[in-house]
Image (tube, grey):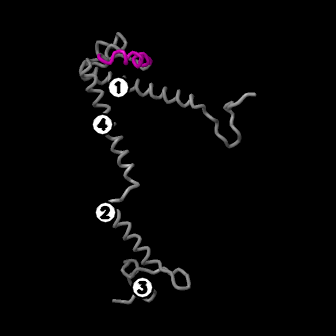
Amino acid sequence: MKTGSNGLRAAGGTPETHPLETLALWLLGGMVAIGALLWLTGQLSGRLFGGAWPPARASEMASVVIQYPKNIGDPAQAWPTHARSLVPGPVEFYATFAALVLPALAAAIGLSARRAGRGTDPGPSQRSACRSRAEAVRDRHRADADGQDHWLRDPRDPRMAGAGGSDFREDRPSS
C-alpha cells in the first residue's frame, strides 16, 4: 500500500509539499541570491577599480558560486578566465561587497527592531493620545440607568454652532 501524497489535491484543498522539496527550494533560492550578489559585487568592483565591466554572463555565475569558497582569499580566481583580469583584488572586492551589504543589513536590523517594539509599551505621546481618545468616547457615550444609550454632542464642536444648545444633555453639574 502506497502512503503519502501524489500531489493531487481535493476540492478546495492545497497540495502537500515534502519537507525536502521546501529545503531544496530554499537552497536554490539562496544559491541564486549568492550568485546575484557575487555578480553585482564583481561587476561594480570591476567598473570602479578595474575601469571596465567584467564580461561575465549570468549563466557563468553558477561556476563562480561553486568556485568562490575555494578562492575566498582572491575572489577574482573564482571568475571565468576571460573576466579575471577585470575583477580587482580582495581588498577592493570586499570593500564593494561591504558597501552593498552593510546598508541593506542595517536597514533590515532597524526595521526588525522597530517591528519588535510595536507590541511593547507605547511612548508618552501615544499613551496620552490613547487616553484622551478613550476619555472622549467615555464622555460622549453614556448609559442611562435604564441601559439605553444616549449620544451626547460636544457643545464646543464648531459644527454645532448656532444649534441653540437645546439638544445638548449634560449629566454633570454645570460649573
Q: Residue at x 40, y 77 (%)?
A: 159
First along the sequence among labels 2 and 4: 4
First along the sequence among labels 4 and 1: 1
The quarter holding residue 82 reads top left
Identify residue for label 1: 40
Q: Please name which of the two marks, 2 or 3, marks the residue nearer to the observer.
A: 2
- Cβ–Cβ below 8 Å for labels 2 and 3? no
Q: Residue at x 56, y 85 (%)?
A: 146
Quadrant of the image containing the N terminus = top right
Amino acid type assigned to the residue bearing label 3 in the image:
Ala
Identify residue for label 3: 163
First along the sequence among labels 3 and 1: 1
Identify residue for label 2: 124
Label 4 residue SS = helix
Is residue 147 depicted above or below 44 in this figure?
below
Residue 103 numbered mark, or none: 4
- Which residues make up the magenta segment? 59-73
Q: Specify the farthest residue to the right.
A: 1
* Residue 172 located within the stretch drawn in magenta: no
Q: Please name which of the two marks, 2 or 4, marks the residue nearer to the observer.
A: 2
Q: Position of residue 105 (x, y in %)?
A: 33, 37
Amino acid type assigned to the residue bearing label 1 in the image:
Leu
The quarter holding residue 132 reads bottom left
Between marks 3 and 1, how big is the CA–CA gap? 69 Å
Between marks 2 and 4, how big is the CA–CA gap? 31 Å
Amino acid type assigned to the residue bearing label 4 in the image:
Pro
Label 3 residue SS = loop
- Cβ–Cβ below 8 Å for labels 2 and 4? no
Q: Position of residue 112 (x, y in %)?
A: 37, 45
